[in-house]
């Protein structure tokens, strides 16, 4: 859908094409992710923004192959021209540990409570990097240092419960970096942390991504946090990406009415006027409306929005597009 | 907050409230340690702080769900006894964070909202009539009364919780992270509803949240809590424009603002210490860039600094003494 809008393919670290994920439910098939086409560029951070049920986490899990077998995933996930969805499970697992690093929301469940963090780190290094004992240990200490854990030799033998939430999330980040990945995927990495800790962990993730010129996808519901670390933003609604572009464009001149609503609903510092209200609630993903899925809540919808299928992407600039009939498309019709 | 202003208008006053939880193995967690604050009639007091700061324990003591170890809670000028009267329980209601677990999944919306009315002596017909009016007031339909919680969205469930809290015509509603579990677009709807109810019914609120922007928007007065104590209070304008306490400053610096790329870490290091083993003296000193020996030795008192803005920090000696800043 956006292939013609993207930069040359050599800059693309990860390319999603028509990625669709369906779950079987009592109401029939539920499309959690609906024909998502996205490119993640080398050295750039992409934030995927969405509210609960928008499909942002399901998207990340589909890419990683972390969904239950009952989930039906179609489309392509290209890494270096190879489709991760087409390769065997074993091969995908190898890629997951080495080329793609993952950071999850809750650091306590991401770590095994019965092993020391040193043991968990060296295990990862032995498995994915084939490092032997002394080398694995010194590399693990390097990683703990890279995520700014004070006194790493001392923490090496600590169990997860002995660390604070912020320290645990640093360990999770260190584990994600163990395989020297080219791509870092983070699912709400600071949501479970306290505000003052959140800011530091976010700053750490941003600096690591830049130092190592990794591609990063960060999934979050927090627009402000996303704008701090990301270069680009993709906004998801009801399983689809409905707007994408550089942070300054999406936040400065949002093209989709939903993005505008989300920005207006965000209470900002020093705000005295009431936050904008998006009426209603997101649609049931098993019973999507025939036209634009946002039309029932949209103040700007017109008859065509309800009937003409989901709107195709319309470009605002070479890098900024939105799936809305009210955005003047390439043909310029309104 | 309870400064020189006339005490007449104070609806809720809390004085030197303490609560320590005893855990297995004889360990003790100091959750609330000497909190004094008040809420004026028709006003909203916002409370901000990170996990473990005691804001939820404070909320539960105000509504009577947790018994304080020490201290006084007065409502409308009268001290509230440990065993509260029916009237006192009607007057102070609470809205919880998780709109789903706060509702009985096996009770219909009408039963959940009407239960308190029945308990407080309304008959069936009167209860049904009141429930319909309440649902209407919070922006739901009368026929939502026959729905069950799982049939509602998160925002609708929180509306039900608000309707239930309003059922007995309270004068003070304590909202403990009442919008935190909601999506931003739904959160805005609930904030608008709360503001509307406040004007219409002259309700007072204690509005607890970790979201500083939302608290600023909702509150007339704000108290910042850290490890069981209030470290600073004032109007939103005072606190947000000219924060005094190093913790308030750190908290404000941590709030991501739209479109700003702050890549350098903010000043405060480390995590919040455990309430099982709080630092001596000022509890923030272990993370404070300005801490000196006096901070470990003496607990700073919450003293008025300027026009009702109060701060508990040795950097700001009480008025009258010389204004020497230690750094």
Image (cartoon, rainbow, N blue to C red):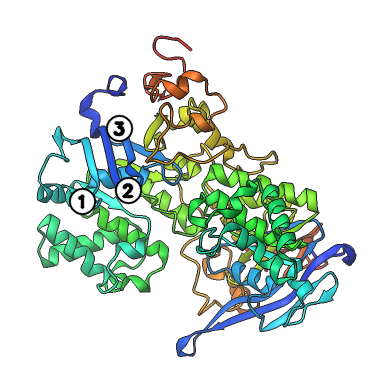
Which chain letter goes with mark 2?
Answer: A
Residue A72 horizontal side relative to residue B133, left or right: left
For marks 3 and 2, the one nearer the N-term is 2
Q: Secondary structure at mark 2?
A: strand
**Which of the pair A121/A305 is nearer the observer?**
A305
| Mark drawn on residue A25 | 2
Q: CA distance from mark 1 to mark 2?
A: 14 Å
The residue labelled by disc 1 is A69
Check whether the beta carbons of the residues at disc 1 and disc 2 lie within 8 A of each other: no
Q: Residue at x 26, y 72 (%)?
A: A116
**Which of the pair A187/B300 is nearer the observer?**
A187
Which chain letter goes with mark 3?
Answer: A
Q: CA distance from mark 3 to mark 2?
A: 19 Å
Q: Residue at x 38, y 70 (%)?
A: A163
Q: Is B227 rendered above or below residue A322? A: below
Q: Secondary structure at mark 1?
A: loop
User: Could you say which quadrant of the image residue B76 lies in?
Assistant: bottom right
Q: Is B32 rendered above or below residue A268? A: below
Residues flagged by tags 1 and 3 on a common chain: yes
Quarter of the picture containing the C terminus of chain B is bottom right
Residue A174 horizontal side relative to residue B135, left or right: left
For marks 1 and 2, the one nearer the N-term is 2
Residue A326 visible in rendering: no
| Image spot of residue B13 (x, y percent) | 78, 70
Q: Is B91 rendered above or below residue B244? A: below
The residue labelled by disc 3 is A35
For mark 3, does the 10 Å Cα neighbourhood hold few (<14), some (14 to 19), or many (20 or more) residues?
A: some
């Amino acid at each position: 859908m956006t292939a013609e809008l993207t930069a040359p393919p050599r800059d693309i670290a990860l390319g999603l094409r028509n990625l669709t994920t369906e779950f079987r439910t009592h109401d029939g098939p539920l499309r959690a992710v609906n024909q998502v086409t996205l490119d993640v560029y080398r050295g750039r951070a992409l934030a995927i923004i969405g509210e609960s049920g928008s499909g942002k986490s399901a998207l990340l899990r589909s890419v990683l192959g972390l969904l239950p077998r009952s989930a039906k995933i179609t489309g392509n996930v290209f890494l270096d021209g190879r489709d991760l969805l087409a390769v065997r499970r074993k091969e995908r697992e190898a890629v997951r540990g080495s080329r793609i690093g993952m950071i999850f929301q809750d650091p306590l469940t991401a770590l095994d409570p019965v092993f020391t963090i040193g043991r968990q780190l060296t295990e990862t290094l032995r498995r994915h990097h084939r490092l032997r004992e002394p080398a694995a240990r010194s590399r693990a200490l390097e990683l703990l240092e890279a995520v700014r854990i004070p006194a790493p030799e001392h923490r090496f033998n600590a169990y997860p419960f002995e660390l604070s939430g912020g320290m645990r999330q640093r360990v999770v980040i260190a584990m994600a970096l163990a395989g020297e990945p080219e791509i870092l995927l983070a699912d709400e990495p600071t949501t479970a942390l306290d505000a003052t800790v959140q800011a530091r962990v976010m700053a750490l993730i941003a600096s690591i991504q830049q130092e190592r010129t990794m591609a990063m996808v960060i999934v979050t519901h927090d627009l402000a946090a996303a704008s701090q670390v990301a270069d680009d933003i993709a906004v998801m609604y009801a399983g689809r990406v409905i707007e994408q572009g550089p942070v300054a464009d999406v936040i400065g001149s949002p093209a989709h009415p939903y993005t505008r609503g989300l920005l207006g609903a965000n209470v900002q510092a020093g705000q005295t006027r009431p936050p904008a209200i998006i009426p209603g609630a997101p649609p049931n993903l098993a019973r999507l409306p025939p036209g634009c899925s946002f039309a029932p809540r949209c103040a700007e919808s017109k008859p065509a929005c309800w009937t003409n299928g989901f709107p195709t992407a319309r470009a605002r600039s070479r890098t900024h597009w939105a799936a809305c009939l009210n955005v003047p498309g390439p043909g310029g019709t309104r | 907050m309870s400064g020189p202003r006339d005490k007449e208008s104070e609806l809720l006053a809390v004085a030197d409230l303490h609560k320590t939880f005893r855990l297995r193995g004889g360990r003790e967690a100091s959750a609330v340690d000497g909190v004094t604050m008040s809420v004026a009639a028709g006003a909203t007091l916002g409370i901000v702080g990170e996990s473990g700061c005691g804001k939820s324990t404070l909320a539960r003591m105000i509504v009577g769900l947790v018994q304080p170890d020490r201290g006084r809670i007065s409502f409308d000028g009268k001290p509230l006894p440990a065993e509260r009267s029916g009237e006192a329980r009607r007057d102070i209601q609470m809205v919880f964070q998780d709109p789903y677990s706060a509702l009985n999944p096996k009770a219909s919306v009408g039963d959940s909202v009407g239960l308190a009315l029945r308990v407080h002596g309304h008959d069936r017909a009167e209860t049904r009539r009141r429930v319909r009016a309440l649902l209407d007031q919070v922006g739901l339909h009368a026929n939502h009364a026959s729905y069950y919680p799982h049939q509602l969205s998160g925002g609708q469930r929180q509306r039900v919780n608000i309707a239930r809290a309003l059922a007995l015509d309270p004068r003070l509603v304590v909202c403990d992270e009442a919008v935190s579990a909601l999506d931003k677009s739904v959160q805005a709807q609930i904030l608008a509803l709360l503001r509307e109810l406040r004007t219409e019914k002259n309700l007072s609120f204690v509005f607890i949240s970790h979201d500083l922007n939302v608290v600023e928007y909702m509150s007339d007065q704000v108290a910042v809590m850290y490890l069981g104590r209030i470290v600073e209070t004032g109007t939103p304008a005072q606190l947000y424009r000219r924060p005094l306490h190093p913790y308030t400053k750190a908290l404000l610096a941590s709030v991501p603002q739209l479109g700003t790329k702050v890549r350098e870490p903010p000043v405060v290091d480390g995590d919040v210490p455990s309430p099982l083993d709080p630092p001596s003296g000022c509890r923030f000193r272990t993370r404070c860039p300005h801490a000196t020996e006096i901070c470990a030795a003496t607990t700073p008192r919450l003293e008025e600094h300027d026009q009702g803005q109060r701060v508990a920090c040795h950097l700001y000696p009480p008025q009258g003494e010389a204004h020497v800043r230690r750094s």
